[in-house]
Amino acid sequence: MIIMSTDASPKQIEVVISRVEKLGFEPHTTRGKERTVIAVVGDQPIKTQSHFAHMPGVDRVVPISRPYKLSSREFIPEDSSFPLDGVRIGDNGIVIIAGPCAVEDRGLLMEIAHAVKEAGAHALRGGSFKPRTSPYAFQGLGEKALVWLAEAREATGLPVVTEAMSPDQIPLVAEYADVIQIGARSMQNYNLLHAAGESQHPILLKRGMSSTAEELLMAAEYILSHGNRRVILCERGIRTFETSTRNTTDINVIPVLKSHTHLPVIIDPSHSTGNWQYVSAVARAGIAAGADGLIVEVHSEPENALSDGFQSLKPERFVELVQQIQRIAEAIGRTVAVKEPH
Amino acid sequence: MIIMSTDASPKQIEVVISRVEKLGFEPHTTRGKERTVIAVVGDQPIKTQSHFAHMPGVDRVVPISRPYKLSSREFIPEDSSFPLDGVRIGDNGIVIIAGPCAVEDRGLLMEIAHAVKEAGAHALRGGSFKPRTSPYAFQGLGEKALVWLAEAREATGLPVVTEAMSPDQIPLVAEYADVIQIGARSMQNYNLLHAAGESQHPILLKRGMSSTAEELLMAAEYILSHGNRRVILCERGIRTFETSTRNTTDINVIPVLKSHTHLPVIIDPSHSTGNWQYVSAVARAGIAAGADGLIVEVHSEPENALSDGFQSLKPERFVELVQQIQRIAEAIGRTVAVKEPH
Amino acid sequence: MIIMSTDASPKQIEVVISRVEKLGFEPHTTRGKERTVIAVVGDQPIKTQSHFAHMPGVDRVVPISRPYKLSSREFIPEDSSFPLDGVRIGDNGIVIIAGPCAVEDRGLLMEIAHAVKEAGAHALRGGSFKPRTSPYAFQGLGEKALVWLAEAREATGLPVVTEAMSPDQIPLVAEYADVIQIGARSMQNYNLLHAAGESQHPILLKRGMSSTAEELLMAAEYILSHGNRRVILCERGIRTFETSTRNTTDINVIPVLKSHTHLPVIIDPSHSTGNWQYVSAVARAGIAAGADGLIVEVHSEPENALSDGFQSLKPERFVELVQQIQRIAEAIGRTVAVKEPH
Amino acid sequence: MIIMSTDASPKQIEVVISRVEKLGFEPHTTRGKERTVIAVVGDQPIKTQSHFAHMPGVDRVVPISRPYKLSSREFIPEDSSFPLDGVRIGDNGIVIIAGPCAVEDRGLLMEIAHAVKEAGAHALRGGSFKPRTSPYAFQGLGEKALVWLAEAREATGLPVVTEAMSPDQIPLVAEYADVIQIGARSMQNYNLLHAAGESQHPILLKRGMSSTAEELLMAAEYILSHGNRRVILCERGIRTFETSTRNTTDINVIPVLKSHTHLPVIIDPSHSTGNWQYVSAVARAGIAAGADGLIVEVHSEPENALSDGFQSLKPERFVELVQQIQRIAEAIGRTVAVKEPH
């Protein structure tokens, strides 16, 4: 949609129209009281945007088509769901993923894995490779952590979710984990998205801290367009002017995403608040707003955690949270997912 | 707390310390490995901040005390609650306020008032004076609308909530309404806050669209410090980079406010989303996160509304929403408030 | 511009078209490969936006016309300029306004007024009524400060700029001051804008800290449409996630405003940085980007200032700044304004 | 700095103090009128932050030390500068980098390279690997583009700046280019930063669109701490609520960075505005604010560009811009850099 200036001359309008035709599109011209608007009709007119923006007499160019397709609910109207070791994500049952921010110690990981399993979690999270703002902060234990996570799965039966930070880590992570996480800082690491699209594993894609809902769907589109249809979207808080919590949970994005895409959507209240005191309230809110699941940090000794201890729930509080989620789920006609026997 | 530069000289530190003493405060000096920090102890040291910021060798000044007092939970640990015509706001029961964005027509207002009353609302909202971005947009009907609101109260028994935009409107609004609203754009209109503080009416104080939680509490402090203790805080969305909804509902602020203040907190999902399709999801989220109530726009003919029709629920959807809120309230051990007989 | 969903039925499209006609507009329909778009042609179609947003099959409604008119460069192509006691603002000469944040003491005000006059300032600023976040902070001296400001004008010949916070303060401020300032927190105080529009005094309108360029122009439109054409726009920093300065100077808005409006535009580097160390750099940047003037805080004893001392320049630094501005002005083919003899 | 609640018990304070001691730090306790504050003195106390945040009676923990070191001006007070093929970046002379957003065609690249060389540019920019929001947009020509860039260097003598998007692209890019760019979306791609730190090439590090100044310095710290001291910081606009330009140029960050770090700082007005009409104004502002250089998009046929044509200057406008920069540089006592003969 090309919007001409109010003072565009008939000649300038003519030139724009003939360029639309020359590029193989059909121009539809509307002459308003104040200005003329030219609609560009054809295949993927969005690519031609910059062709017109510089032309004399053009005020601005407004795109009409949405730029994503495979992730769009207009393209696939039904909810997508897929299995996660005995439960389905994207279905009526709420899926809960829990565990420590970073894997730090084998014994501690086992202890937490058993605790979250008992409380009702469906999957275990834990960072092996940690993206950290400071080069001097703890960077994760790497493959050693992956081995321990696989052992924790063995011991508890919980599938494992962990992050890959670069394309070359994907095969390694895929060897040990069940779901590969793309972190918020990597949401626009296109080489990584490309590699994730070629993986067979479900991808947990976190929204970048300053990415729009549309950009999140475009990042998902990278993965889908490279062949992997199993993508879980995750709201983990955005960056705003408010400083009383580490990020601002964009609760609106839950119904927005559920309306625009068929992909499952979960919420991460640990990162979106950055403060354990607010985690349960925001987790309840996410489920009440329509999220399909939860990823939450649990640590049995948060005061000794090497990363993000301040936002981790102790196991006893996590038990309470699962019970609250159960009641909220029922209030909106859903349940917490129940694992099917193999 | 005065933080000296790493290269501050002993002389510079000495000068800062003696100025602290001259101003009547007690300096407490901590010499770290990298830098020296001087704590200023005494009454309201916060006022002296700029006295030190310019001094040679000073890196920055960090305030430690919170700047609000009467609204603080540290000052009043128990929840504040107060009556609203037969229900109490701030108590266990969730309070629901509903009605049109603007009062436009007497008949329509009566119709909507009866509809929301029947659906279970506890109070009627409706704008008489409308703050509008454009001078060419509908500005509200003023006193005529106030008269109709009072008639709607007469007919339905619902107390009335409506906005005052300037100090001189407060007596007029107080004559007809039960609760005086201070809108988001007026949250830092200090003359208005002052006048609201001298009123006997409960005040519904909306968070400014780019105000922090702390600034909202400071605005409440203006009202409280002028003698009116009945203030209801309202989250109505903040301005961020995300454009898929009109504002971003800051759901984190619900538990943050409940932890920092004793005042009741409600949520306005109509303004915080700007889109009727997302209103119910965000309303449920707000209650699940711990809000004490809801203010929501309902209009029987949203397609003909002169203001904000796009975010108004039709009465039949509002009926459903009240039922959903009832179930969410129960899930967290609360109820929707029940009006006591007079 | 009404954008239909990709799955809108021919019937739904028909219904929208006939409603456009019924409202007295002309529908122009463009059928693309993916979706249909209906342009609404006629007088002020913008008011009808919400009429269509709720209709079945409608995806979204995109406004095409700009919502302001009198402030628009499309309406008045030439720069507006007007006299300010011997200089013209909006002309080729850069106008510099300087003085203390708040008027605190008569002697100090006189001292600063003489200092800024000597350094080359064209007008004196100073707060009489101070909007303060905290009810416990210094609120300004009110009329006493106005009297002193008028005395400083008498002594130095500098016209006076000071803020009015409410409609009823406008006549009082107008009695003593030459330019009435509307502060950032009041930019959407519509009753105040209305009153400013009925004044004969030039208005210095500060951008709200989370207002868009378009909203600033809409606020100016309130003043212009009530009869006062002498409005100076002022960028004073916006609120973002960045915390290393108090606000973020939106330098882009200088050329944006100069392109969209004929009104003069100035920059306030004191509030837009909140730190005297960055004031001169940002002042130079503002003029280099095309601003018509500068408003800057100067205080001879910033360490004793009751308000915003941290962002005030000492007179000796202000002298240097005026010299820098002179050189930057020349580099872009302008000058610092020279006062004409009476 | 551990800040206790106002209602912390003496017992709770005691427990915190003894934990500080047990961790090997020295506690310095200040008892104010309202609350107690405990300073933690020792080596890198910042790592212990989460150890205390969960403890009963603790209100919050405020870090005092800055988390970066090698990039800090406190560590290296003098400006860093380093050679760039005959000019020095970080010195008194302003360095100008120009060229197309993406390399699209050999002939066109040569034409633009000659044009910017003649206009006075010191280096040639051009994207070989393009990070694009959409998987369907032009992704760059990869190695073919690198070969052409090297040919353009051969022909014009201009050193080449181009982006690497993943660690494995660094050796390839290093083979052809003189400066390796880390793009805004990659600023927190820590594996890439690590690889850049092991390179011998100067790194042009762009600020992430929602990264703070401190996070930019932390990203630089990754590169510096892995051995590469030649890092150029680049402001390219941040994401805010304002939509009249694509991003908001944070002009404040120029003097902020110059004050906090010794590294050279440049500005990218093409991305920070997203609109060629505003590029020159913002480029002038950047230099006036103290930037050491400029990176700007120039394209001889912007209307045919496959990427970002809307923000590219035509060569004739770029000639004007270089002249303007020359005058602004002189106004602040600098010059545009002059290439030394080999």
Image (cartoon, coloured by chain):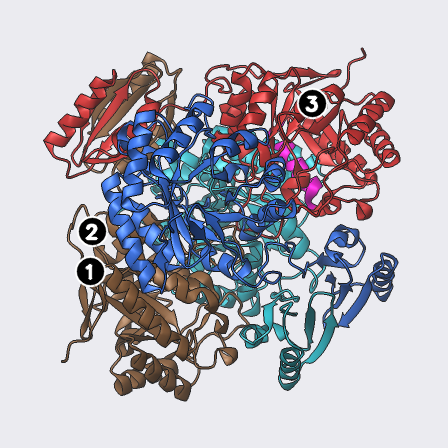
Chain colours: A blue, B brown, C cyan, D red
Query: Cβ–Cβ below 8 Å for labels 3 and 1?
Result: no
Q: Amino acid at mark 3?
A: Val
Quote the CA–CA distance across marks 2 and 3.
58 Å
For the C terminus of chain D, give its image quadrant.
top right
On the image, the x and y values in percent for residue A294 come to 39, 48
**Residue at label 2?**
B70
Q: Amino acid at mark 2?
A: Leu
> Which element carries disc 2, helix, strand or loop?
loop
Chain letter behind tag 3: D
| Majority SS type along the magenta span | helix
Q: Nearer the viewer, residue D190 or C181?
A: D190
Other residues around mark 3 within 10 Å, as few (<14) / some (14–19) / many (≥20): many
Q: Is residue B280 left or right of residue A12?
A: left
Quote the CA–CA distance across marks 2 and 1.
9 Å
Please check the rendered image and state whether residue D284 is part of the magenta-colored stretch, yes or no: yes
Other residues around mark 1 within 10 Å, as few (<14) / some (14–19) / many (≥20): many
**Residue at label 3?**
D179
Q: Where residue C135 is drawn, which disc sits there?
A: none
Quick check: B100 above or below B156?
Answer: above
Other residues around mark 2 within 10 Å, as few (<14) / some (14–19) / many (≥20): many
Disc 2 vs disc 3: which is toward the camera?
Answer: 3
**Residue at label 1?**
B229
> Which element carries disc 1, helix, strand or loop?
loop
Residue at image position (40%, 15%) is B7
Residue at image position (51%, 37%) is A185
